[in-house]
Image (cartoon, rainbow, N blue to C red):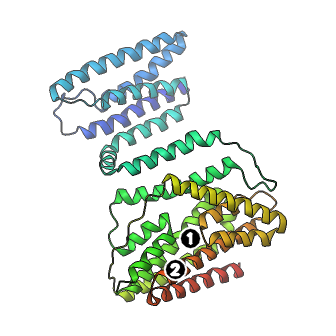
Amino acid sequence: MDALILQLSVALAIGLLVGLERGWQERDAAAHSRTAGIRTFGIAGLLGGVSTALAEALNEISVLIAGFLAFAGILAWYKAREAVHDEDFSVTTVIAGLAVFVLGALCVAGDFRVAAAGGAALAALLASREILHGLLKRLTWIELRSALVLAAMTAIVLPLLPDRAYDPWGGFNPREIWLLTVLMASISFAGYVAVRILGNARGLIVSALAGAVVSSTAVTLSLARIAAASNNSLSLSGSASLAAMVSILRVCLVVLLLAPDVAAFIAMPALFAAVAFAACAAIMLAVAGGKEDNATPSRNPFEVIPLIIFALMFASASTASAALASQFQEQGLLASSAIAGAFDVDASVLSAVRLAGHSISIETIGHAVLAALMANAIGRLSLAAFAGPVKFWLPLAGTTLIAATAGYCTMQLL
């Protein structure tokens, strides 16, 4: 009996929560002019729970079915009258009412905690109407296509890939490589979407930070080209340093998600290097006087061809890392990470991290990740020197040296 009272209470609470959101949306409407408000939704949740309790007590599922159909018919009829009066074609209230009834039934028939989570998610979704509609208006076809490709790659392609190694060293596992590739692209895509929701980047600093979520190397190269025709190279160098900081933090996040033990090993050196980049960037931007140049916006990170290229690079780096690590142990992994990191830090880091739990120690994998970060910093600096003027890459070189020294000294002290 006590358990049933708790379950019915949760069912009522779910209805009241959803009804609160619905009532707030229609708070300016005249009294008795709307089909369902906070009380009606509360009763709907309680009705779903009571109908389920009666069905279980009588051992007749038809009681629950009849209760659901009766409730759905009454709600739909009144909502149809309201729609005719208001010339409104929205069916959200009806669907929400049916969902509340079902969640109320789930409270009694299943796990009431799952039902409570569903009710909270339903209320949050209903409350996000303006945000979601605004996002749809600003969404481009390229971005929609990328999201659909992401869903297909995750839900269709991934389960079909074999989950076993095809090389003697255990480095080429198609499903594992594709899973980490999609994870990396998803993180970049999430950052891209966040930038689109917040609006176009305003100013040099925001552009650099936003672009670095996708690729700090691309941002550095873009800033170097801008610096060739700019009189504010110091500000551009500061923005490139901020992009380097974001790159380090992004790598730390990926390692934390995939191998927490490795993340604990690299955390202090990597974070001290990131802080050094941030401090030097703040100084350069302050000296430059806050002048702004327009940086190029970040590209969509989830295009098919770049994704396939990344997967091939990752597979090659992963296989090479496993082979070298098997043949030469620590020295082989460090060498492969440094070489691959100069071209793509994400592929290099993922190749090293996926060896966690095998014959390679956590310390060795941590050193490999740090070596990849260092090699990538050198690679960015080389591109800056190639594409930009001395007044751009020289301050960036000094900042990179300071950050590398900070990270190295921290690692030695620890």
Circle 1 residue = 248
- Mark 2: amino acid: Phe
Residue 267 visible in the snapshot:
no
Q: Residue at 63% of width from left, 60% of height from top?
A: 313
Q: Is residue 340 visible in the rendered structure shown here?
A: yes
Task: Name the one closer to the observer, 222 or 198.
Answer: 222
**In the displayed structure, would residue 72 be above or below residue 111?**
above
Residue to which mark 2 is pinned: 277
Question: x and y percent of residue 249 in the render?
Answer: 55, 68
Q: Quadrant of the C terminus?
A: bottom right
Q: Residue furthest right?
A: 327
- Do tag 1 and tag 2 residues touch (Cβ < 8 Å)? yes
Residue 206 screen position, x and y as percent: 38, 70
Alpha carbon separation for disc pair 1 and 2:
10 Å
**In the image, residue 217 lies at what x, y percent?**
51, 71
The residue tagged with tag 2: helix, strand or loop?
Answer: helix
Q: Residues within 10 Å of mark 1 (few under 14, many from 20)?
A: many
| Location of residue 5 with respect to 411 vertically, above or below | above
Residue sitting at 63 percent across and 39 percent down? 159
What residue appears at the point 50 percent right and 66 percent down from the top-left corner? 215
At 18% from the left and 24% from the top, the residue drawn is: 84
Based on the displayed image, in which of its 4 quarters is residue 260 positioned? bottom right
Judged left or right of residue 334, residue 214 is: left
- Residue 309 image label: none
Horizontal relation, residue 146 to residue 133: left or right: right
Judge by depth and name the residue closer to the eye, 19 or 137: 137
Identify which amino acid the numbered label 1 is placed on: Ile
Q: Position of residue 374 (x, y in %)?
A: 63, 76
Q: 234 left or right of 376?
A: left
